[in-house]
């Protein structure tokens, strides 16, 4: 039995189990198990975006470790921009790492064709054509997820010979960068070894080593403070997102959803008629910065810093985050506290197991009461769970109930703000019985 806002018994609806069974009925257990196994092995739908992003940021951050990196970094971005716009023969820049965008964008090119394009491009930029060709072929193997570094070099060298490119690459920065990468145990060590081997104000091999290390260990291995010091950060993020969007996850073939193509939404909840709350704001969103393939919400590859800036631009003061620590790890958003702090947004956490109810009802109620006071003081609160539907909708409706709305009105306003939210019977029951909570 269910009760309406006045305590009257209403018609019996579907149970929690029935709603969940219908929601996930179209997803086979084999599909869930297969995707989870591929991701755990590091070769799943999130692996390619991780490597693409790691390559670009790895190269740029590697270049940042020398005295005058801005020109080389911008030249690499110019090449990537041109390739993404369909210009397959962009003008060469001044750094050997300018060939990096070629294998990242032209992932389906034949090895011989890729090698020749990289050789021409590298020579035009004043570098070693053979060395740049070898670098492009190494990047190609790393993009495929290959792990044995010695074997990768052997296969790339064999590809180079099959392309009939003559010359030597031993003294090219691409080869020196490879040497530093091959001896390193992580991103920071790869860049450090490259700089030690080539001291001075210019160290192109550090950018090469950074690109290779970013590919191998992924973008998450690059220190966030280093990334935040890059020149033209918004342009870099836009180009990286455009690059990621050229990949398609194995689950459904749809493009990845990025922060650039799909800015973080904030579904505003109507506060009209709630005395003292009109100067504040309440909105529902999903987990900022999530990198996760959801069966009902799509494949997201978002940037945490970009999403945090988006919330700040929307005048959000407080983010109520309802996900658990394990979800933050699965969605690769463990740095959310630092990202929100950088934007002056207060992060309030109250983890709730998906798709269940708060374990400690009294603590949850105290949290909602404090947020109502924040809104009464003119603050703007965003509420987020992983998908921005069940837990977020429940919390938003409870906030409206605490502010004085009836259960039906609170649930109705949440449904209007975020269609598809707050559909689970147990969570609706918590909203309906809010005044009876301890």
Image (spheres, rainbow, N blue to C red):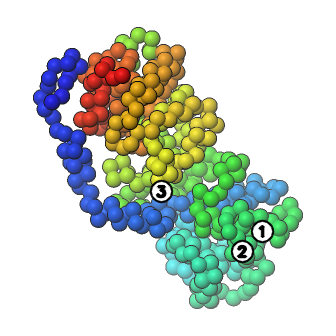
The residue labelled by disc 1 is 193
On residue 183, the disc is 2
Q: Residue furthest left?
A: 11
Q: Residue furthest top?
A: 275
Q: Can you see residue 40?
A: yes
Q: Determine whether the residue tagged by mark 2 lies in a helix, strand or loop.
A: helix
- In the image, residue 270 sits, relative to residue 14, either above or below, namely above
Q: Determine whether the residue tagged by mark 1 lies in a helix, strand or loop.
A: helix
The residue labelled by disc 3 is 245
Residue placed at 19% from the left, 39% from the top?
Answer: 15
- In the image, residue 151 sits, relative to residue 2, either above or below, namely below
Q: Quadrant of residue 179?
A: bottom right
Residue 161: x %, y % from top left: 62, 89
Circle 2/circle 1 CB separation < 8 Å: yes
Residue 428: x %, y % from top left: 27, 31
> Quarter of the image containing the C terminus?
top left
Query: Relative to 65, is 362 on the left or the right?
Result: left
Packing grade of label 1 (10 A; few <14, some 14-19, many >=20) is many
**Dot placed on the residue nearer the N-terminal end, 3 or 1:** 1
Circle 3/circle 1 CB separation < 8 Å: no
Measured in 3D between alpha carbons, the distance from the residue under mark 3 to the one under mark 1, in whole angstroms, is 33 Å
Packing grade of label 3 (10 A; few <14, some 14-19, many >=20) is some
Measured in 3D between alpha carbons, the distance from the residue under mark 3 to the one under mark 2, in whole angstroms, is 32 Å
């Amino acid at each position: 039995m269910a009760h309406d806002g006045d305590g009257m018994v209403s018609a019996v609806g579907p149970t929690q189990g029935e709603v969940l069974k219908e929601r996930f009925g179209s997803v086979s257990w084999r599909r869930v198990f297969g995707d989870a196994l591929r991701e755990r092995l590091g070769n799943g739908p999130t692996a390619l975006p991780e490597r693409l992003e790691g390559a670009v940021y790895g190269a740029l951050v590697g270049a940042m470790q020398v005295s005058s990196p801005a020109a080389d970094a911008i030249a690499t971005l110019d090449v990537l921009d041109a390739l993404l716009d369909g210009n397959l023969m962009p003008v060469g820049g001044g750094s050997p790492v300018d060939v990096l965008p070629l294998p990242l964008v032209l992932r389906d090119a034949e090895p011989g064709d890729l090698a020749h394009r990289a050789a021409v491009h590298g020579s035009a930029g004043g570098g070693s054509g053979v060395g740049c060709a070898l670098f492009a072929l190494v990047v190609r193997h790393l993009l495929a997820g290959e792990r044995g570094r010695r074997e990768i070099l052997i296969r790339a060298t064999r590809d180079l010979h099959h392309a009939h490119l003559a010359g030597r690459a031993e003294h090219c920065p691409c080869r020196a960068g490879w040497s530093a990468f091959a001896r390193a145990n992580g991103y920071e060590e790869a860049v450090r070894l490259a700089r030690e081997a080539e001291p001075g104000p210019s160290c192109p091999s550090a950018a090469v080593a950074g690109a290779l290390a970013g590919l191998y260990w992924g973008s998450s291995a690059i220190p966030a403070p280093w990334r935040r010091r890059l020149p033209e950060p918004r342009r870099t993020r836009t180009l990286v997102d455009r690059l990621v969007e050229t990949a398609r996850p194995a689950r459904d073939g749809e493009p990845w959803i990025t922060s650039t193509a799909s800015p973080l939404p904030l579904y505003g909840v109507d506060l009209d008629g709630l005395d003292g709350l009109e100067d504040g704001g309440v909105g529902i969103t999903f987990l900022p910065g999530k990198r996760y393939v959801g069966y009902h919400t799509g494949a997201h590859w978002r940037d945490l810093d970009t999403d945090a800036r988006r919330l700040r631009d929307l005048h959000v003061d407080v983010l109520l985050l309802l996900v658990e620590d394990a979800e933050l790890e699965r969605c690769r958003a463990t740095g959310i506290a630092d990202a929100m702090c950088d934007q002056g947004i207060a992060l309030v956490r109250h983890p709730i197991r998906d798709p269940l109810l708060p374990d400690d009802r009294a603590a949850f109620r105290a949290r909602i009461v404090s947020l109502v006071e924040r809104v009464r003081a003119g603050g703007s609160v965003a509420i987020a769970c992983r998908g921005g539907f069940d837990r977020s909708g429940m919390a938003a409706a409870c906030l409206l109930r605490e502010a004085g709305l009836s259960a039906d009105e609170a649930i109705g306003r949440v449904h209007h703000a975020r269609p598809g939210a707050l559909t689970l019977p147990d969570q609706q029951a918590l909203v309906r019985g809010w005044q009876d909570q301890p």
